[in-house]
């Protein structure tokens, strides 16, 4: 069987970075989960220590998906057994531990074979997988996935989870979610804001690790939903490459963390996952409404992005205008700098400068 070298056209997807791979609670001991990230098929599970692992979901023998197999103990090591010919691959490093068809004395070293392993990390109730730019990469990444300070208050248990597939390139989903000007048009609903309220906004932004933040501020007076928390809440919104947005809302007593991961499954399909953590008992009472509200938001964004595809099919030029589209411009600059700094093997230099942006929404 001929060997193939991998080539990858520029699909506009970032590599050498940590992608959100799933919720801790969705990756169960003894189970296997298939997941596509940036066009790569992954199988996720837990090794003998309970730590999550990620392997390429293609058997090195003849390409059957390992996720269709099962987890099996082999001499004390957790292995994934391929469903086709039963080869076993060690969960922690992907090394082949067993080939059932070999007979005594057959000179074939199974341990030379390896399913590709992707670094995986679990923290804060979330599992992250590192997708390297170089398919031969075997080490550990030079940076860690994000940690969220708000979880010191909210804990690691997701209270509310929303998901939706967007049929678009990740860039359109990211830009759509960070765009402040679409709110009054796409998210017009009585419980969020009144229909005729367009207000001048001025928000301070600053660079943050691999991204930027809308600094902590009092939310707009035209948003009813924040009032639920009571007190005088503040909000801070942080964006970080490759596509993670967090909003931390807090008052004197309580904290809510809204986590949004925009994950490219491949170059044309993107999954949005929203996870909310909180320590406010009142929110735990009204969570079905929060779920409905969140779902309405996500569906509105998704329908708009789907509609936008009709125009994008014709590959038109797109515009970004000041200041409402500045975050989208930063996103593009951040991506460019990410790719350049990785290719040149140098430290990432954040292109964002502190600034106050103004728009009406
Ligand atoms: S294809 Fe996996 S063992 Fe043969
Ligand atoms: Fe939106």
Image (tube, rainbow, N blue to C red):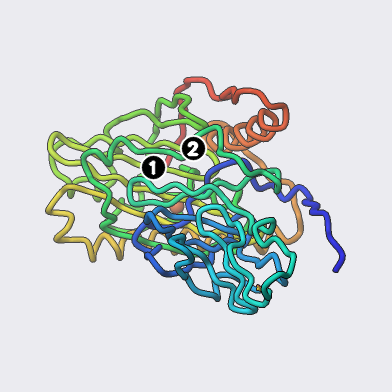
Task: Give me the C-alpha separation between circle 2 and circle 1.
Answer: 9 Å
Above-or-below relation of 356 to 193: above
Quarter holding the N terminus? bottom right
Quarter of the view holding residue 116 = bottom right
Horizontal arrangement in the rendering, residue 72 relative to residue 195 (left or right):
right
- Answer with mark 2 or mark 1, whichever residue precedes in sequence: 2
Along the line of sight, the residue nearer the viewer: 7 or 272: 7
Question: Which residue is at 29% across, 59% downward?
Answer: 160
Along the line of sight, the residue nearer the viewer: 318 or 76: 76
Q: Residues within 10 Å of mark 1 (few under 14, many from 20)?
A: many
Q: Which residue is mark 2?
A: 240
Name the spot of residue 267 as percent of width and height, x first. Answer: 67, 57
The single residue placed furthest to the front in the displayed view is: 105
Above-or-below relation of 38 to 229: below
Question: Which residue is at 84% across, 61% downward?
Answer: 3
For numbered disc 1, what is the local secondary structure?
strand
Q: Which residue is mark 1?
A: 246
Question: Which residue is at 30% across, 39% downward?
Answer: 248
Quarter of the view holding residue 110 = bottom right
Is disc 2 in contact with disc 1, using a CB cutoff of under 8 Å?
yes
Badge number at residue 141: none
Along the line of sight, the residue nearer the viewer: 120 or 206: 120
Above-or-below relation of 59 to 341: below
Along the line of sight, the residue nearer the viewer: 166 or 63: 63
For numbered disc 2, what is the local secondary structure?
strand
Quarter of the view holding residue 66 = bottom right
Q: How many marks?
A: 2
**Residue 13 seen in the current view:** yes
Name the spot of residue 296 as percent of width and height, x first. Answer: 37, 63
Horizontal arrangement in the rendering, residue 197 relative to residue 95 (left or right):
left
Q: Residues within 10 Å of mark 2 (few under 14, many from 20)?
A: some
Quarter holding the C terminus? top left
């Amino acid at each position: 069987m001929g060997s193939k070298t991998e080539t990858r056209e520029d699909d506009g997807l970032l590599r050498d970075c940590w992608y959100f791979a799933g919720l801790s609670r969705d990756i169960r001991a003894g189970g296997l989960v298939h997941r596509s990230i940036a066009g790569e098929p992954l199988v996720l599970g837990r090794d003998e220590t309970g730590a999550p692992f990620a392997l390429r979901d293609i058997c090195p023998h003849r390409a059957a998906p390992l996720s269709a197999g099962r987890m099996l103990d082999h001499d004390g090591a957790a292995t994934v057994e391929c469903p086709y010919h039963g080869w076993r691959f060690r969960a922690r490093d992907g090394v082949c531990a067993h080939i059932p068809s070999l007979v005594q004395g057959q000179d074939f070293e199974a341990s030379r074979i390896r399913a590709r392993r992707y670094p995986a990390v679990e923290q804060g109730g979330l599992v992250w997988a590192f997708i390297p730019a170089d398919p031969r990469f075997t080490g550990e990444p030079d940076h860690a996935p994000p940690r969220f300070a708000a979880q010191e208050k909210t804990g690691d248990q997701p209270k509310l989870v929303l998901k939706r597939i967007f049929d678009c390139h990740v860039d359109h989903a990211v830009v759509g979610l960070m765009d402040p000007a679409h709110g009054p048009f796409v998210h017009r609903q009585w419980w969020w804001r009144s229909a005729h309220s367009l207000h001048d906004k001025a928000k301070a932004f600053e660079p943050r690790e691999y991204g930027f933040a809308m600094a902590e501020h009092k939310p707009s007076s035209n948003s009813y939903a924040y009032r639920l928390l009571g007190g005088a809440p503040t909000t801070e919104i942080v964006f970080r490459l490759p596509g993670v947005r967090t909003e931390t809302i807090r008052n004197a007593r309580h904290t809510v963390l809204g986590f949004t991961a925009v994950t490219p499954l491949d170059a044309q399909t993107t999954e949005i996952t929203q996870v909310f953590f909180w320590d406010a008992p009142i929110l735990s009472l009204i969570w079905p409404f929060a779920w409905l509200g969140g779902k309405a938001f996500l569906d509105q964004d998704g329908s708009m992005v789907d509609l936008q595809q009709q125009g994008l099919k014709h590959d038109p030029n797109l515009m970004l205008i000041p200041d409402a589209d500045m975050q989208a411009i930063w996103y593009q600059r951040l991506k460019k700098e990410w790719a350049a700094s990785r290719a040149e093997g140098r430290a990432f230099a954040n292109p964002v400068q502190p600034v106050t942006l103004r728009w009406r929404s």
